[in-house]
Amino acid sequence: QVQLVESGGGLVQAGGSLRLSCAGSGGDFSGRIMGWYRQAPGKQRELVAKITSGGTTNYADSVKGRFTISRDNAKNLVYLQMDSLKPEDTAVYYCNKVVVPLPWGQGTQVTVSS
């Protein structure tokens, strides 16, 4: 069964940092564009960062300069380093393929207190 499992979320004060991890299993994701998404209460899920197999990255304006996406193709891992966190970053964070996403996992909760 192909699946993605997110981890690393938690409660942090504004200005703090967290590193999220996404582990892929049951398939080879190394050639896929992978993304980190988030969904805040009452809002639609949005793509905040994506990375190609070759390491080219792209970010939403709201996180540019604060978040860094990276990947380890050999281990089927994708990371999201989040620095200078703001209360508006509070959301459930998910990883997924950007093209033809898989069924969504449970995500990992990130809560930023002011």
Image (tube, grey):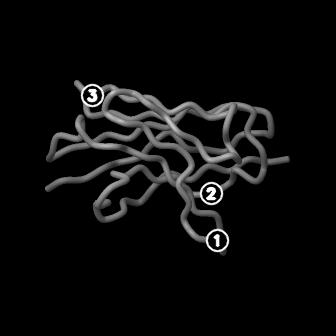
Between discs 2 and 3, the one toward the N terminus: 3
Q: Label 3 is placed on what type of residue?
A: Asn
Q: Residue at x 70, y 50 (%)?
A: 89
Choose mark 1 or mark 2, whichever is in front. 1
Between discs 1 and 2, the one toward the N terminus: 1
Q: Amino acid at mark 1?
A: Lys
Residue at label 3? 73
Measure how far apart labels 1 and 3 are at the Cα level. 31 Å
Question: Is disc 2 surrounded by few (<14), some (14 to 19) or many (20+) residues within 10 Å?
Answer: many
Asked if the residues shown at circle 1 and circle 2 are in contact, with their CB atoms under 8 angstroms apart, the answer is yes
Residue at the extreme bottom: 42
Q: Which residue is mark 1?
A: 43
Q: Residue furthest right?
A: 114
Q: Which residue is more in the foreground, 99 or 72?
A: 99
Q: Would you place residue 76 above or below residue 49 in this image?
A: above
Label 1 neighbour load within 10 Å: few <14, some 14-19, many 20+ = few
The kind of secondary structure element at disc 1 is: loop
